[in-house]
Image: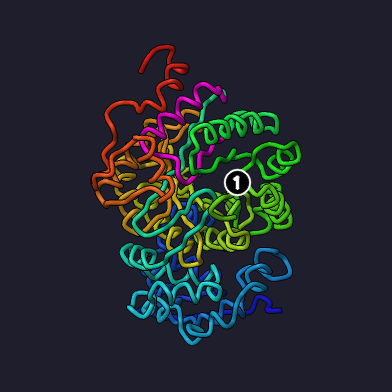
Amino acid sequence: MAKTASFTFRHSVGSRTYGFTNLAQLMAKATPMRSGDRLAGLAAQSAEEHVVAQMALADVPLKRFLQDPLIPYEQDEVTRLILDDHDPDAFAPIAHLTVGAFREWLLSDNASPDALTQIRPGVTPEMAAAVSKLMRNQDLILVAKKCEVTSAFRNTLGKPGHLSTRLQPNHPTDDLTGIAASILDGLLYANGDAVIGINPATDNVAQACKLLHMMDDVIAGYTIPTQSCVLTHVTNTLEAIEQGAPVDLVFQSIGGTEATNTSFGFTLATLDEARQAALSLQRGTQGNNVMYFETGQGSALSANAHHGVDQQTCEARAYAVARKFEPLLVNTVVGFIGPEYLYDGKEIIRASLEDHFCGKLLGLPMGCDVCYTNHADADQNDMDNLLTLLSVAGCTFIMGIPGSDDIMLNYQTTSFHDAMYIRRVLGLKPAPEFDAWLQRMDIYQNDGQFTLNTEVPTHFRPSLERLLGHSP
């Protein structure tokens, strides 16, 4: 099996000569500036060095990434996964290309949706990350838009012309009444087709089971074609399944190195065990994608587990982990980790477009938590811009949270109204099965404008009366 090889490049600009000692260093120096790489001491020291690194990277053959793993094969199970699962037949049509030529091919009409689907098993995360470093934002949007990826459980996600949402009804004390109120509020704004997903304030098996039963009652009571998830640790979900809880999706935060995932408390074998357990429940009606993964640039660095690899490339490597387990949803929580890793709105927007591009190119149903923390140099206008760019690029799903303010996790994201905005502006619809349910339930009118009914539909009045104590 391939081992880490030496890579040297020297390039002179005027009287100054730049040298890059290995492929990981070259990739890091070619990355658009962000605070995490500066914190790690990996970033280019000047704009000139950054451009020189991009020029050098453009000349690297794609084959080099198979010969020269950034993290040694013997030391990292994610590297072993990437190389062992690589499909040489799918790689053959692009095997002769350099990184720069790969960019030109991706932007050409030859890279049709069908052609992009065919090469997916032959593209490694490092190849995707490398080519993204040579792209402008519009390049990332154009290519991602051409990558068609669908997944299914109780509905079908990712079809062209559709944009889904995760209804996120978090509560600081896990109060079931408060959570139920947020769920009903979100449903009345046509949110929740990707998943109704709760981050528990109290993270244990008993609490997870309680929340799972409550969501299952709502979904079954209204025959909603969607799925639920409690975003607890994968081992908690395994135990919940053993206790007979109604688990639809298995959640886990993942990273791009074995050391990162070890710090999260799992291995690839753990994920495989959980996936098999969820599949055994046979709760899907439209498909069997039972995994939900979340990622974020900077997680490997924060765990001191990045091996000298830049944070965006580590993030792309996490998508190899996700791809192995055929998820329903992958969510890059792009601004949540904080300004130490993505300092401001510009860095958050760039990182999100990179993540979305790399995930879609690798064949993942990519969504994005369009978000920021209150100590980042960003605001809601930055998020409006990012939401619009991602939706143009064919993002699978976004978050839907009351008032765009998660009162349990204490960060700013997208609201139920934001989803309405982008669906109206771009003419997008929820997942087909959920869209049909919304019309059956008289939540919105199929008039081509995605117009919500101004009054609470009759079906929901009894539930709202119980929650509010009076007629809505």
Give yes or no for residue 176 being in the magenta stretch.
yes
Residue farthest bottom in this picture: 96
Find residue 357 and report its image quarter: bottom left
Q: Position of residue 29 (x, y in %)?
A: 46, 67
Question: On the rendered structure, is 300 left or right of 204?
Answer: left
Report the number of numbered marks.
1
Identify the residue at horizontal 57%, vertical 25% (top origin): 174
- The quadrant in which the C terminus is found is top left
Q: Position of residue 281 (x, y in %)?
A: 68, 47
Query: In this orientation, does residue 81 appear?
Result: yes
Give yes or no for residue 20 being in the magenta stretch.
no
Question: On the rendered structure, is 444 left or right of 176?
Answer: left
Identify the residue at horizontal 68%, vertical 70% (top origin): 72
What kind of colouring is applied to the model shown?
Answer: rainbow
Q: Tag 1, which secondary structure?
A: loop
> Is 312 rendered above or below residue 437?
below
> Is 48 rendered above or below residue 196?
below
- The quadrant in which the N terminus is found is bottom right
Q: Position of residue 84 (x, y in %)?
A: 67, 73
Question: On the rendered structure, is 208 left or right of 438?
Answer: right
Identify the residue at horizontal 55%, vertical 23% (top origin): 176
| CA neighbours of label 1 inside 10 A, class few (<14), some (14 to 19), many (20+) | many
Query: In this orientation, does residue 298 appear?
Result: no
Q: Position of residue 213 (x, y in %)?
A: 62, 31
Which residue type carries mark 1?
Answer: Leu
Residue farthest top in this picture: 469
Identify the residue at horizontal 51%, vertical 53% (top origin): 297
Please state the extent of the stretch shown in magenta in the rendering: 174-199
Instruction: Name the residue carrying label 1.
Output: 249
